[in-house]
Image (cartoon, grey):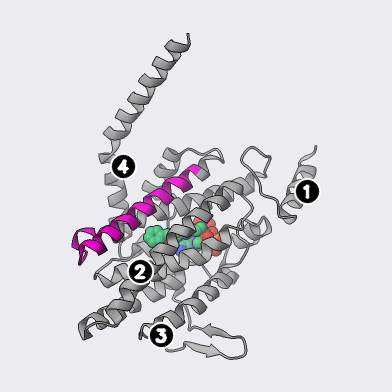
Amino acid sequence: MTIEEREREFQEKIDSGQKIEPKEWMPDEYRRQLIRMIGQHAHSEIVGMLPEGNWITRAPSLRRKAVLLAKVQDEAGHGLYLYSAAETLGIDRQTMINQLITGKAKYSSIFNYPTTSWADMGAIGWLVDGAAIVNQTMLARGSYGPYSRAMVRICKEESFHNRQGYEIIYQLANGSEAQKKMAQDSLNRWWGPSMQMLGPSDADSTNSAVTMNWKIKVESNDTVRQRFIDRTVPQAHAAGLTIPDPDLKYNEETEHWEIGEIDWDEFYKVIKGYGPCNAKRMKARNEAEEQGKWVREAAAAYANKKSKKQEKQVA
Ligand code: FAQ
């Protein structure tokens, strides 16, 4: 088969809704795009543990602490799951981690903001996991088998994260004046970055044409963002909170909530490494890599010893 014939057959498979599995032929660019996206996603889960990890020791009750611990642990699990999905494309985990800690690979812009109050644990679960779920339920319909299947399980856990976050925010918003203020302040700080988190507007999205053609993504950034907005605005109102956007309005005709300008200058600044916590996040991941070295070496030595013993037994 010529390369053109292979590409045509591949496209037909995608167009007919079939999944692509690891050992099947795929265009180099399809592989590259997937490694880029799954890698970024995995790194986001791992770096995403840091802002919430910051509050584990200061959770206001044992129940809140147990739930937060479980949530942060879930994010680690998602990261490992996603690194494994990327490994099916021929890249190994250490290479991806090296790309993260040297700043070559991106991770989500949203995790470069500080968590300055307990209400931020609510806002992250409600808004960040909320945006992640809306995006990931779309990605679960994507064309690459291992990634789409990983999304199904991850979304189930993210739904629990989302509810626990909304519960925190709702309780604070319906608590004392000080608690209500704390919830509103948190929404004020996280709303804008949550809008940005779903990627540049369709006109500026550099990868969407390619990734949507191959159904790596089946909906555009703006479509996903609108769904997230429509779902979240009524939740804010139900909690008695105000979305920090003077231009927010409901369009009766389209039945969608419309928002004002998103601060794209801020977004590009953050993804270029100049957000409030980029340096701190990179330092934390580099230190973790360094401090965990002996564990990895010990585990590798044990694995080597075990496989040598098995070889001897077989011989
Ligand atoms: N941050 O061409 P597009 C979570 C980059 S998981 C940083 O539109 P694309 C769970 C993009 O990479 C959150 N960079 O890109 C959790 C590209 O640069 P490149 C992560 C961003 O890929 C919750 C350039 O801008 N989820 O939260 C961002 O088609 C709580 C042009 O953009 C995923 O990664 C951004 N926000 O669409 C964990 C899901 N947006 O690579 C802990 C998988 C864009 O060409 C606690 N990823 N860029 O140099 C996706 O669905 C897509 O990658 C999008 C962006 C939709 C994020």
Of the residues shown, which amino acid type is indicated by label 2? Gly
Alpha carbon of mark 1 to alpha carbon of mark 4: how far? Answer: 43 Å
Of the residues shown, which amino acid type is indicated by label 1? Arg
Question: Residue 130 or 28: which is nearer the viewer?
Answer: 130
Alpha carbon of mark 1 to alpha carbon of mark 2: how far? Answer: 46 Å
The answer to which of marks 2 and 3 sits earlier in the sequence is 2
Q: Which residue is mark 3?
A: 237
Q: Position of residue 69 (x, y in %)?
A: 29, 56
The structure residue drawn at horizontal position 76% and vertical position 41%, both measured from the top left corner, is 3
> For this view, does 181 lie left or right of residue 231?
left
The answer to which of marks 4 and 2 sits earlier in the sequence is 2
Alpha carbon of mark 2 to alpha carbon of mark 3: how far? Answer: 16 Å
Of the residues shown, which amino acid type is indicated by label 3? His
- Neighbour tally class for label 1: few under 14, some 14-19, many 20 plus, Cα within 10 Å: few
Q: Which residue is mark 4?
A: 289
Q: Which residue is mark 2?
A: 165
The structure residue drawn at horizontal position 52% and vertical position 45%, both measured from the top left corner, is 85
